[in-house]
Structures are given as C-alpha cells and as structure tokens.
C-alpha cells in the first residue's frame, strides 16, 4: 500500500489494512493532539476528550476558540483518511456506503471500527434497486430534487436542534458537528437520488441546504442572527464535508438505494447521539475571577461608587453594538446586610442581596438573578434561546477596598466574582 492510496476514495480496503491504518492513525493523532494541547495551549488532554468536549460552547472564550480551531485544523487530514478508508472497507465488506456516517457517532464509532476490522471481504452482487416510495416522492427534475433535498434536511435538522436546545439544553458536538454534517449529507443523497450529479453542484446543494436551515432557525425564533453567524464558520465546512461524502457514495444505479437507507438510519441515530452526549456531560465548572484597580481617592470616597453609581455612557466598541451585555448603572435599596443592590445591564439587572456591609472596606453580596449575557438580533421582539440562560451565571461577588502604602489618599479596589 502506498501513501497516495490513503487519500483516494476509489477502490477497496481489506480488514487487515483497515485495522492497521486505523490504529497507527489514532496513535499518531492522539500524540499530536496531546503535544499541541499541553505544550502550546497548556491544557490537559486525555482519551475521553474525543467524546467529552474540553470546553463549554455557550461560554466560549477567545482562548477556547483558538484551541478548538487549532485542534480542528490538525484533525482535517485524519478525518479525510478515516472517511476514505472507511468507505473502501464498506465496499470490501459488501456493506452500504451510507454507513460511513457512523464515523462521526461518538462511542458507537469504536464499535463500528471493531466490526469493520473483523468482517470478511465479500464480492457484492450487482444491485437491482426495487421501486421505492421515494421514487414517487422525489422529483426527477434537478430543481425539484434539489428542493426536496433541502426539505428533507430541514425535516431532520430542525427537530434535532429543538431536541438538543429546547429539550436537552445541551450545546455540544452533536449539535455543532453532527447536525450540520447530516444536513449536507442528506441533501446531496436526496439530490442525487435518481442520477449522479457533479461535485460542484453537489457542494452547492449542501451550501444552500445549510443556509436555509440557518435561516429557518432565525425565522422560527429558535436562534438569533448573531449566534447563527458565530456558528457558521464551523457549520458550513461540516455541511460541505457531508455533501462531499454524499457525492462520493453516489454511483450509477445506486444513489437511490443509499438515500432510501441513510435517511431512516439518521432519523434514529441523530437523536440517540444527542441524548447519549447529554447523559455524559460533566457538572458545570465554577470559576473565580479576580480583578484590581488603583484609584487616587480615599476608601471612603470609593465606597460611594461601589455601593451605587450613576448612568454610564454607552460603549462604542463594536462587540457591545452587536448585543453583548454592558453595565449601565447600579442602584441600592436600603443599607447594611439585607439590603439589595441592582447592577443594571443593557439586557437586565443582576439582583445582589448584601451579605457583608463593612463600610468603607468590604461589600460582599450573593446573586439571585442574572440577566442574559447578550441581546440577540432577531426580526421578532425578542427570542430566548436556552444558551442565553443558565450557562454563564454569577453566584456572588465582593468589593474589597485597601489603602495603598505611602499615604491615606490612594486606595485599591479588589473585585471578586465567583461565576
């Protein structure tokens, strides 16, 4: 076997060759991932991180985004080789090519790999496709079949998003990776049902399908424009990858049979993937954020601005113009322990019952109500996707005022916010 054979989608692969490439590829990839994660990003990396996300998507930081981009970019050649070898092994075992979709199913893909490693080679008999109800449902005309491909993907993709977000409240690999891939795959398989199509037109079909899917999420008040735009750099390439797989597994006289088999399989497998991922989620982590600032004023003068502050000017940075929450003013109802501080943001108010009132030294409070972290762009008055509530919350905080050495006038304010 030559290196160039790893990259081609043509031909077949025996079980021994498939097992050898899979084991060597996994060992190589795991060590590359581990070195990149630990040496470059100073993060721990273990075997279970391939099934349990190392970051929290709703509270994704810039560091998390760079980490995911680097890991994803390094995974692309391994994904290509894995898909091509799996497709060739399926051909060798006489199995339907749509089974390549199992490559992306967490946990189940391990069992799938083991099964392909032991199944013997088999020469498939010429397939004679019997008439199917899909023959009557899917139009023969290219425009009609393209429209039906978009309709079929949204009949699968929209319920999957609702199950993940509204039903399970889970934003993970199944939602951000599995659903876009399936959108591209199904759209092309339906589009090529009656006859094979060219590569570029298949990729265009996958792009249109994922675009309309995203538009329906906005039109149906399921998500807002900002979140859809943020997800697009990940969703569009995955949809194109799904479209590429759909293009590869089409063949004269066989495309319809693949579509008739893959759609029911994905209808059952995708919800199971989302439910299994949700069941394996670890508890939400708690972080402590500390910040400090030196102020040329006495602690008594600073205390007045800590307890409450007047209206702030609107920020001019583009990030806040897009809808990210920003502070407006703070109001205090009462004084001493038991009083209630309202820190008003552009999306609502933090309700902060006072626990410690040590004037002018320490103000400590809990947080009983958190506003949404951002305001979505939407044609409706408001949308309330689950990721705007319960995923990034503050439990409490404190302001500690300390006089600085060298005089009574300068002071330093330390701000502690467990979230």
Image (cartoon, grey):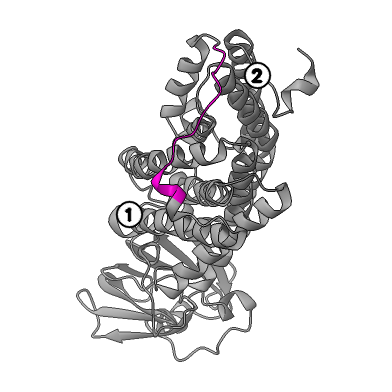
Mark 1, residues whose alpha carbon is within 10 Å: few (<14), some, or many (≥20)? Answer: some
Location of the N terminus by quadrant is top right
Q: Give the magenta part as a residue range.
A: 122-135
Tag 2, which secondary structure? loop
Q: Which residue is mark 1?
A: 163
Residue 319 part of the magenta segment: no
Locate the C terminus by quadrant. bottom left
Mark 2 vs mark 1, CA separation in Å: 37 Å
Q: Is residue 96 left or right of residue 197?
A: left
Q: Is residue 276 left or right of residue 206?
A: left
Please tell me whether mark 2 or mark 1 is closer to you in this view: 2
Q: Where 315 falls versus 146 (above or below)?
A: below
Q: Is residue 416 visible?
A: yes
Q: Which mark is residue 20?
A: none
Q: Main secondary structure of the magenta part?
A: loop
x and y percentages locating residue 364 in the rendered image: 32, 67
Residue 12 got which mark? 2
Relative image position of residue 140 (x, y in whole percent): 56, 55
């Amino acid at each position: 076997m030559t290196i160039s054979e790893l990259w081609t989608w043509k031909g077949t692969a025996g079980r021994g060759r498939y097992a050898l490439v899979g084991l060597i590829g996994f060992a190589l990839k795991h060590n590359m991932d581990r070195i990149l994660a630990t040496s470059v990003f100073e993060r721990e990396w273990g075997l279970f991180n391939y099934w349990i996300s190392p970051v929290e998507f709703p509270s994704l930081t810039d560091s998390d985004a760079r980490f995911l981009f680097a890991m994803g970019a390094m995974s692309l050649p391994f994904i290509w080789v894995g898909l091509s070898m799996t497709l060739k092994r399926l051909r060798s075992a006489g199995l339907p090519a749509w089974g390549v979709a199992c490559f992306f199913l967490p946990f189940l893909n391990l069992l799938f790999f083991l099964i392909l490693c032991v199944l013997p080679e088999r020469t498939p008999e010429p397939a004679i496709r019997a008439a199917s109800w899909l023959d009557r449902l899917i139009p023969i005309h290219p425009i009609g079949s393209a429209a039906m491909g978009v309709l079929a993907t949204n009949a699968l993709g929209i319920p999957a998003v609702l199950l993940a977000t509204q039903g399970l409240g889970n934003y993970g690999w199944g939602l951000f990776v599995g659903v876009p891939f399936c959108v591209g795959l199904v759209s092309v398989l339906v589009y090529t049902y009656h006859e094979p199509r060219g590569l570029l037109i298949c990729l265009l079909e996958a792009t249109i399908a994922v675009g309309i899917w995203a538009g329906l999420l906005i039109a149906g008040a399921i998500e807002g424009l900002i979140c859809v735009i943020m997800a697009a750099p990940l969703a569009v390439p995955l949809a194109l990858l799904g479209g590429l797989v759909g293009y590869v597994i089409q063949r004269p006289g066989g495309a319809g049979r693949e579509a008739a088999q893959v759609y029911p399989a994905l209808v059952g497998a995708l919800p199971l993937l989302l439910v299994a991922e949700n069941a394996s989620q670890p508890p939400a982590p708690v972080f402590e954020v500390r910040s400090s600032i030196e102020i040329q004023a006495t602690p008594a003068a600073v205390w007045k601005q800590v307890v409450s502050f007047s209206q702030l000017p609107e920020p001019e940075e583009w990030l806040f113009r897009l809808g990210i929450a920003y502070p407006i003013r703070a109001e205090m109802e009462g004084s001493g322990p038991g009083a209630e501080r309202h820190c008003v943001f552009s999306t609502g108010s933090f309700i902060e019952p006072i626990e410690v009132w040590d004037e002018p030294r320490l103000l400590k409070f809990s947080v009983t109500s958190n506003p949404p972290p951002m305001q979505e762009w939407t044609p409706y008055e408001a949308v309330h996707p689950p990721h705007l509530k319960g995923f990034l919350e503050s439990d409490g905080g404190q302001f500690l005022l300390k006089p600085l050495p060298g005089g009574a006038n300068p002071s330093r304010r330390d701000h502690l916010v467990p979230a």
